Image (cartoon, rainbow, N blue to C red):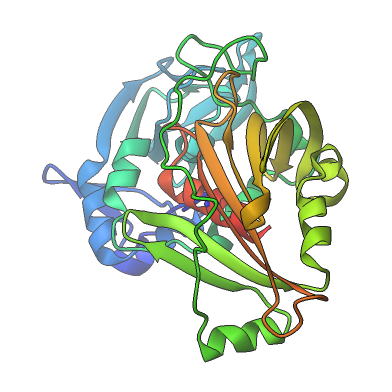
Amino acid sequence: MKVLLYISLFSLLQTNAIAKDGNCESVDIQQLPVFKSLLPSDVNRLMDRLEKLESDEGEVIIVENDRDNDMYFISEGEVECYHEKKPKHSVKTLGPGDNVGELALFFGTPRALSVRIKSKKAVLWKLTKDSFDSSVKDTEISDDVILSLLKRTYSDEKTWVNLPKMTFADGKTHASWERPHTHAGKFEAYVPSKLLVKDLDVQAEKVLKEGGSYKHSLGGKYFNRIVVVQDVEAPVKAVLNEILDYNNYNKKVPQTLESEVYNTKSNGDVDTFFTRLKTGMRGFSMEFFVKSEYHKKHNSVVWCLDYEKLSEIDEACGYWRAEPHPSFPDEKTRLHYSVDMSLGSNVAGCVASYINKKAAND
């Protein structure tokens, strides 16, 4: 499951000038390490997509709680941030070299404050989420860069639970038991009978023997799917019991805040569990409904969203496969697992990638 982040152009361009339509405007966006990490080819594409705005005093460029996802770099003049309930009280003032709106661009969150032009004139450069995503083609933004932005933004661990969720087309922002999901499935389901990684090489076996996890990308049309293989010091049955213990995920699975099974079904070799989960990590909390099928014949569990209920993520599916360890079949388990997730179009591609990888690794 790229993530939360951006660019410091001076190290790549060796200048603080942005050329646009024959003009140069001084812009300093060094504060965001993601931009600093971009390759020159991506920087050039991004520069071409920046939109110059010349604004007058009092003009509002961002409205509190709106769902637009533009980010602004201030070149000239000043802007002030304020709450709609107290429009005359300025929370903070920003000037040349500052930026505003990165949370909306990367996370798709509603605007936390309104922003208006404070000086008589101001020059800003606008970057949209679509422009960012379409510009970053050659750079693999590291997880450390994304995490650094999260840590910079959310200093209080309690704030992640209260962060606004994604908004649906009808303006709703919360999961619902009564309403169906926005679609009936977009991803191709995992196949319970299929072992995703059949033959491990010497290096992979070495990693597992040393207690580590081996990660393998499926590639092709499944390029987003990473399979993690891990040896567990417990027999297969015990491992599967832990996986299926959904009511207690909030007590033992990292970042799981709430968990409850709301329905079960059994049909011969397949047991089905319907579970409500709420997960949280810095910057995100998501409530969603999952349908899991335990295929006893294959010691596997495949899951997807319960599309009869409305989840706060766009799409997700996953896979568990518990195999007896090749050397210690009665004592240890070789566990394969994978997750594929989409947070929706409001979230920047690099952020969605990070969340996907985080989900697989945890």
State the image coordinates of residue 184 (x, y, percent, origin top left): 45, 24
Between residues 228 and 84, which one lies in front from this camera angle? 228
Q: Left or right of 137: which side holds 87?
A: right
User: How many marks on residues?
Assistant: 0
Extreme residue in the front direction? 268
Q: Is residue 49 above or below residue 334?
A: above
Q: Left or right of 68: which side holds 312?
A: right
State the image coordinates of residue 91 (x, y, percent, origin top left): 65, 26
In which image quadrant can residue 310 be found? top right
Which residue lies at the image location 56% right of the left edge and 31% below the top edge? Answer: 313
Between residues 174 and 51, which one lies in front from this camera angle? 174
Q: Is residue 227 above or below residue 230?
A: above
Q: Left or right of 242: which side holds 361?
A: left
The answer to whether any part of residue 283 appears in the image is no
The answer to whether any part of residue 225 appears in the image is yes
Between residues 124 and 107, which one lies in front from this camera angle? 107
